[in-house]
Image (cartoon, grey):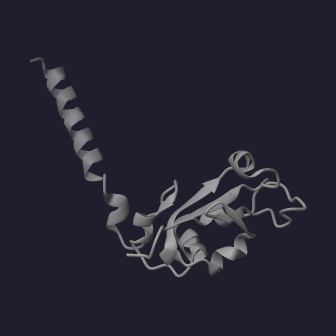
Amino acid sequence: MPRWAWTLALAGLLCLGACAGSAGAEGDGPGPVRGTGDITREELDREVYTSAHHAIERLRRSWLRRRGARTPNNPDNRPSVYVDGVRVGPIEELFGISAEYIERISLLSPTDATTRFGTGHASGAIVISTRRGPPE
């Protein structure tokens, strides 16, 4: 085998080793793992959270920021909150939702929220699905 082929093979192995070595690095350190998708029950079980707001603040802080245009339905331009498909009100309602009963938390874009729930979602929506039955 030519020398350049050995060099290329060695470079490939080094790259694979580096990629494999960092695969679990995000969750290895102290503190919660911060992702970009939905917050799942599995993610909530990694640490104790007192409320939905506390979990979102620690895991997806950007979901709580102001966004979009102010509207009569949303004067503080923050996402609306839904629990099991029912609108519960402004973002402050997240403080009253116990993280113990949450199965999944999702952030919908303004377009997706409007398609799913109708008009008045210029800032999107935070959608919470609760567990079916008592927590384990």
Name the quarter where the N terminus is drawn.
top left
Position of the C terminus by quadrant: bottom left
In the image, 112 versus 54, the foreground residue is 112
Which of the 4 quarters of the picture holds residue 111? Answer: top right
Q: Position of residue 100 (x, y in %)?
A: 48, 77
* Residue 67 place in picture, x, y as percent: 75, 58
Asked where in the image residue 61 lies, by quadrant, the reply is bottom right
Q: Is residue 65 left or right of residue 38?
A: right
Q: Could you tell whether 74 is left or right of 1 in the image?
A: right
- Residue at x 52%, y 54% (from the top left corner): 36
Extreme-left residue of the structure? 1
Horizontally, is 107 left or right of 31 in the view? right
Q: Residue furthest front?
A: 133
Rendered residue at 24%/40% (across/down) = 16
Closest to the observer: 122 or 67? 122
The correct choice, above or below, for 126 with respect to 95 in the image is: above
95 relative to 81, above or below: below
Pick whichever, 128 or 57, lies toward us.
128
Q: Residue at x 83, y 63 (%)?
A: 74
Coordinates of residue 128 in the picture (x, y in percent): 59, 64
Query: Which of 83 and 121 lies nearest the eye of the viewer?
Result: 83
Q: Position of residue 73 (x, y in %)?
A: 86, 62
Residue sitting at 88 percent across and 58 percent down? Answer: 71
